Amino acid sequence: MIFSGQRPNNLGVRNGRLAPCPNSPNCVSSQSSDPTHQIAPLTFTTTPEKAIAFLKRIIQSLPRTKIITESEDYLYAEFKSALMGYVDDVEFSLDPKTKVIHVRSASRLGESDLGVNRQRIETIRAKFISV
């Protein structure tokens, strides 16, 4: 737990948006416009309720993961690295009108994440589209 850091106080949805990524490259967000941080949102064709329930099951199936906050249109989970116990904060915000789930995955500490946050979202995406 030495590298867990403090839980950020800027998480959640404000005015329909997740928090912007910091300048460091260890964050990805589907609501970012710059190429370093930009990642595509998840898309769904089922009902919003089924989409968020399926997403929750995927998150719970991943190792060293703890869901901190959940509602009908928002999930926030902490992912801990196996080796040093680094914690990443991962958020999902469902927009029922556009049938997308916006994502944000950010490391709490350090500068580089060696692409871990981007890879995590792509792993979740691969499982999400295999419905």
Image (spheres, rainbow, N blue to C red):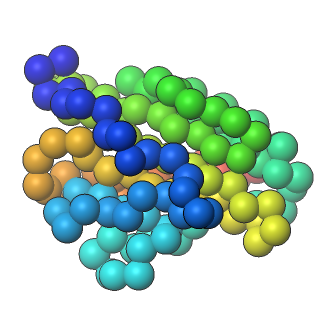
8 up-or-down from 15: above or below:
above
> Which residue is depicted at the point 32% across and 40% down?
8
> Residue 61 sits in which quadrant?
top right
> Which residue is depicted at the point 28% across and 75% down?
36
> Which residue is depicted at the point 82% across and 51% down?
48
Q: How many marks?
A: 0
The N terminus, quarter of image: top left
Q: Could you tell me if residue 81 is visible in this image?
A: no
> Which residue is depicted at the point 56% across and 53% down?
13
> Residue 112 sits in which quadrant?
bottom left
Considering depth in this image, is 4 or 122 the residue closer to the camera? Answer: 4
114 up-or-down from 20: above or below:
above
99 up-or-down from 65: above or below:
below
Residue 75 placement, left or right of 48: left
The percent coordinates of residue 22 (x first, y second) are 25, 62
Residue at the farthest front position:
15
The percent coordinates of residue 75 (x first, y second) are 59, 40
Residue at the farthest top position:
1
Residue at the farthest bottom position:
34
The percent coordinates of residue 79 (x first, y second) are 37, 33
The percent coordinates of residue 85 (x first, y second) are 20, 25
Q: Could you tell me if residue 96 is visible in this image?
A: yes
